[in-house]
Image: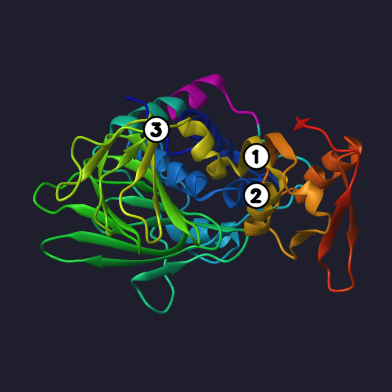
């Protein structure tokens, strides 16, 4: 896998950023407001705009666009957190004003140069009071560029602590989920440490998710060495045992996923669809015949107040489809329209699901 998979589509975001580079040269107040809306949608929008702006400013007759500080102000949010916008808040997308074809071509040429530039330019996002601790609340995502050039995207309700030394680049993921884009640095390994396992990057991109009873890692690019903290061989999808069990680590390749359960020796390894695993970057949730109980638990990670299932018969109802994590109402409407379940709201705001006609749901 040669293409970078860390974003929904880096090419699409780069093109949008390039269009804004051109449009802002003659932007009126409405256009600048639309630009601020576009920035708020994702930390990746800010990162790509800064990178392309830096290249654009080096071209003859062109100047750089807004600085990192100005972008942070325009985004009108906490410096290190981007909240997921609700679909009902604004159903329309920010429209990029038209620009001359030559200027747009120049800006998109700058976008191409960004991909090959040595050392991308990141918006330095300020952490909290503890400079090594990064957290997100429910419904938030955070883009964290690290000092070595690595980039971490924290998902909703996550917490990580960065602890770099001369020997290791360690990140302790204590809660939630994170997508890592690791910068190569010989002689100083990059490790993600959880209660269940240690994951060491081999020049790679990978996703780590911590649940209450297990930790799951998915390799997107490169390879990752997995060392469960409870000694024992890895268990492969076909029931076989990994060739390189402890004391040596298990090496995962692109498209492989490993789960390490709390208190269980070894790791269960399977092949997986990478795009489904990192769909949360697009605020999408992909379900394939997943029991409704687990689907609701997933939605509750991103939304408050929570949803509860009152009818136990509903818990095993299989759900398939792609849904927006920040548009839970549409999912509940889907259940109602399919006559699978009905929802009501208690005085405390909790949404309660009761049974419908049942059956398998597919969107």
Residue 93 percent coordinates (x, y): 71, 39
Q: Which residue is mark 2?
A: 294
For the residues marked 3 and 1, what is the alpha-carbon distance in whole angstroms?
19 Å
In the rendered image of this protein, does residue 152 appear above or below residue 3? below
Res. 8 visible in picture: no
Badge 1: residue crowd in 10 Å (few <14, some 14–19, many ≥20)? some
Q: Which residue is mark 3?
A: 237
Compared to 146, does 129 lie above or below?
A: below
Verify CB contact (< 8 Å) between mark 2 and mark 1: yes
**Residue 34 located left or right of residue 251:** right
Q: Earlier in the sequence, mark 3 or mark 2?
A: 3
Quadrant containing the N terminus is: top left
**Magenta span of residues:** 98-107
Number of numbered discs present?
3
SS category of the residue bearing label 3:
loop
From the top left corner, tell me how far across and down residue 293 is, in percent.
70, 50
Check disc 1 and report the residue beneath it: 290
Q: Secondary structure at mark 2?
A: helix
Mark closest to the chain's N terminus, 3 or 1: 3
Residue furthest out toward the left: 187
In magenta stretch: residue 99 = yes
CA separation, marks 2 and 1?
A: 7 Å
Judge left or right: residue 278 versus residue 348.
Answer: left
Q: Are marks 3 and 2 in contact (CB under 8 Å)?
A: no
């Amino acid at each position: 896998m040669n293409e970078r998979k860390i974003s929904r589509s880096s090419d699409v975001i780069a093109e949008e950023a390039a269009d804004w580079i051109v449009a802002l040269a003659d932007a009126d107040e409405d256009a600048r407001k639309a630009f601020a809306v576009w920035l708020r949608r994702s930390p990746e929008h800010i990162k790509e705009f800064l990178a392309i702006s830096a290249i654009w400013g080096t071209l003859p007759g062109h100047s750089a666009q807004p600085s990192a500080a100005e972008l942070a102000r325009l985004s009108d949010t906490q410096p290190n957190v981007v909240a997921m916008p609700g679909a009902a808040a604004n159903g329309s997308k920010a429209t990029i004003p038209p620009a001359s074809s030559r200027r747009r071509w120049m800006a998109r040429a700058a976008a191409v140069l960004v991909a090959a530039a040595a050392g991308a330019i990141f918006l330095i996002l300020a952490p909290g009071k503890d400079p090594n601790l990064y957290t997100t609340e429910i419904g938030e995502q955070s883009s964290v560029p690290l000092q070595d050039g690595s980039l971490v995207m924290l998902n909703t309700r996550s917490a990580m602590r960065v602890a770099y030394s001369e020997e290791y680049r360690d990140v302790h993921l204590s809660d939630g989920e994170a997508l890592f884009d690791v910068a190569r640095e010989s002689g100083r390994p990059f490790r993600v440490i959880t209660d269940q396992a240690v994951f060491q990057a081999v020049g790679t991109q990978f996703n780590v998710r911590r649940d209450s009873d297990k930790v799951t890692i998915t390799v997107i690019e490169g390879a990752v060495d997995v060392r469960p903290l409870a000694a024992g061989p890895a268990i492969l999808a076909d029931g076989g045992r990994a060739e390189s069990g402890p004391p040596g680590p298990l090496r995962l390749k692109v498209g492989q996923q490993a789960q390490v359960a709390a208190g269980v020796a070894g790791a269960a390894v399977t092949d997986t669809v990478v795009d489904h695993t990192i769909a949360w970057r697009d605020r999408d949730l992909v379900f394939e015949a997943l029991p409704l109980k687990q689907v609701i638990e997933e939605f509750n990670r991103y939304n408050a107040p929570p949803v509860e299932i009152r009818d136990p018969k509903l818990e095993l109802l299989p759900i398939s489809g792609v849904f927006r994590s920040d548009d839970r109402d549409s999912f509940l409407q889907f259940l109602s329209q399919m006559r699978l379940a009905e929802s009501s709201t208690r005085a405390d705001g909790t949404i309660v699901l009761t049974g419908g006609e049942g059956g398998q749901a597919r969107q």
